[in-house]
Amino acid sequence: MNANQTHCLQLLRDTDPDRYLSVLYAPEGKRGALAALYAFNVEIARIRDLIHDPLPGEVRLQWWRDLINGTEHGEAVGNPVAAALLEAIKAHNLPRAAFDNYCEARIFDLYDDPMPSRNDLEGYCGETASALIQLASLVLDAEKAPAHADMAGHAGVAQAITGLLRLLPLHRRRGQVYIPADILAAVGCSAETVLEGADKDAVKRAIDAMTALAEDHLGKYEAGAKSLPAALRPAYLPVSLTRTYLKGIRASGAAAADETAVISPLKRQWVMLRASMR
């Protein structure tokens, strides 16, 4: 790994231990590119917390989009994540349109608008988490990756919905609700009810509905996971933790709106080790 890639791996260790650990299971020659890809995800995900107003956040997102599409603004050399990402894109011929779509989807994070529907949520998850799995798969084996795009889709949606449930306490503090309006209506809840948190039964119903949706996609991924080539397995290793997280969220009930579901480092390593050996 070069210095920029090492920086990316360190960033992951501090901010995204699930993906950090998965990188260590990848072939040594692929780790730098994977670390850059996941570090880019970290940088985009934290824009909302670093830049509290939507417009400057959109400007920052546009900077990344311009950079990836070849319009540099003089900062790439001093930004190790940007430099490592550009290197990974070039080395593995990664589709720049996927990054552009990813950034477009992430604009939603900057605002407090409601998630309109389940289809919108699945689209958001597909352009973000599923896209990351597909891009990581292209890094690992560009020939085998395209045949498993559907599997990446289900895996990413399950992973992303679970991540949104884990971030529910943070989102409530921000005034954000990612649970789609049609799901809320179906269980007799509302965005306002989720934010207020007083009606615990309604909040639990909303969390249970989201958990069921994640489990549905996870089941579809797991049904075909045995056919996944060994070369692509590291891209999917973070998804192996999803069912464990979901069990914790289900057990917490309405408390999941106030407490983030976590996995101990030892449990994380054990689950991922088992997944890597299947």
Image (tube, rainbow, N blue to C red):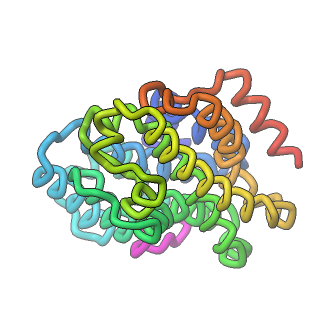
Range of residues picked out in magenta: 91-99
Nearest the camera: 107 or 172?
Answer: 172
Percent x, y for residue 245? 63, 37
Along the line of sight, which residue is nearer the eye, 210 or 155?
210
Residue 147 location (% of width, % of height): 71, 78
Q: Residue at x 46, y 45 (%)?
A: 164
The residue located at (72%, 45%) in the rendering is 240
Q: Main secondary structure of the magenta part?
A: helix
Can the viewer see residue 220 in this picture? yes
Report the residue at 35% width, 32% height from top: 197
Residue 143 quadrant: bottom right
Q: Quadrant of residue 270?
A: top right
Question: In this image, 37 relative to 263: left or right?
Answer: left
Percent coordinates x, y for residue 63 in the rendering: 21, 59
Instruction: Name the side, left or right, on which 263 lies relative to 15.
Output: right
In the figure, 7 relative to 225: above or below?
A: above
Image-quadrant location for residue 68: bottom left
x then y, percent, for residue 224: 81, 66
Which residue appears at 56% of the width and 32% of the height? Answer: 253
As for residue 94 lying within the magenta part, the answer is yes
Q: Nearer the viewer, residue 84 or 108?
A: 108
If the image is split into quadrants, where does the N terminus sit? top right
Decide: is 275 above or below 229: above
Tell me, yes or no, if residue 6 can be seen here.
no
Count of numbered tags? 0
Q: Is residue 14 above or below residue 219?
A: above
Q: Is residue 245 magenta?
A: no
Q: Is residue 9 left or right of residue 195?
A: right
In the rendered image, the vertical position of residue 203 relative to residue 76, given as above or below: above
